[in-house]
Amino acid sequence: PQVGLKTSVVPNGVDLDTFRPLPRDDRAVREWRSAICPSGKSFVVSTVALCQPRKDLGTTVQIAAKVVKACPEVAFYLQTDCRRMLSYDLDLPHLARWYGLKIGKDLVLHDPETAQKYTDVEIAALMNASDLYMQASVGEGWGLPAFEAAACGTPVAVADNTAPGSLWPRDAAIFLPVMERWIPHYRLPRHPVLADQAAEIIISHVHDRDSLDRKAERAKAWVQEYSWDRA
């Protein structure tokens, strides 16, 4: 009880031995790059998330559609538990096609038969193979994948709400703008990402490698504070 009274926040930890920068010619990184970067594409935005309402994957698809239209060289990779989509009345492939995205080229969706079966080592290689990691959820209790991506030296874009909006330094990430919606039944605010504005921000960074590199370096240094040893 006495310890509990003195503890205000218990942070998550990041396995910095596993999630670390790897050279682009690393075999695992090359294999991931080949899998997530289709022919004709040169910039990959990745998202790793459970398929549940608060992850708001429909908004991720909306952002992808606008970014790809403006920047055809960009591909989005979404790793999620596709088997759960119908439980939430969400058909991501149908939604993506409705927005004009080509599945397997503009949007690479994870194989539903193998969802969430990758090891941390494999996910770290995925993060290293990505040009940008994006997390456009309605809310996060912590948002661990974004921390892991930053530890790999990959630039990160997070929703400017809940934990990401409170925790991340303003110079360490791209912040996606949100709006506030009130949910009367729960008497709680909800802060979904504004897809059009978020897409414009992503577009502005696609060709600004220097800005992305600066944010990535700042984030990588900051994330060192969240090692398991320190947590």
Image: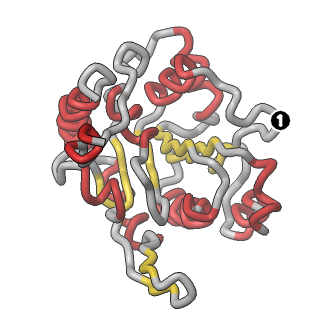
How many labels were placed on the picture? 1
Q: Residue at x 63, y 41 (%)?
A: 79
Residue extending farthest to the bottom is 184
Q: Is residue 131 left or right of residue 99?
A: left
Q: Is residue 200 above or below residue 218?
A: below
Q: Quadrant of residue 218?
A: top left
Q: Is residue 84 above or below residue 128?
A: below
Q: Residue at x 81, y 48 (%)?
A: 83
Q: Is residue 82 left or right of residue 183?
A: right
x, y percentage for residue 163? 34, 56
Q: Residue at x 33, y 54 (%)?
A: 164
Q: Residue at x 29, y 25 (%)?
A: 227
x, y percentage for residue 67? 48, 60
Q: Is residue 167 left or right of residue 161?
A: left
Residue tagged 1? 113
Specify the color scheme: secondary structure
Front residue of this view, candidates 196 and 222: 222
Q: Is residue 168 above or below residue 69?
A: above
x, y percentage for residue 101? 67, 59
Instruction: Give SS at disc 1.
Output: loop
Quadrant including the C terminus: top left
Q: Which amino acid lies under the numbered mark 1 shown in the image of this protein?
A: Glu
x, y percentage for residue 203? 38, 58
Q: Is residue 117 left or right of residue 183?
A: right
Q: Quadrant of residue 166?
A: bottom left
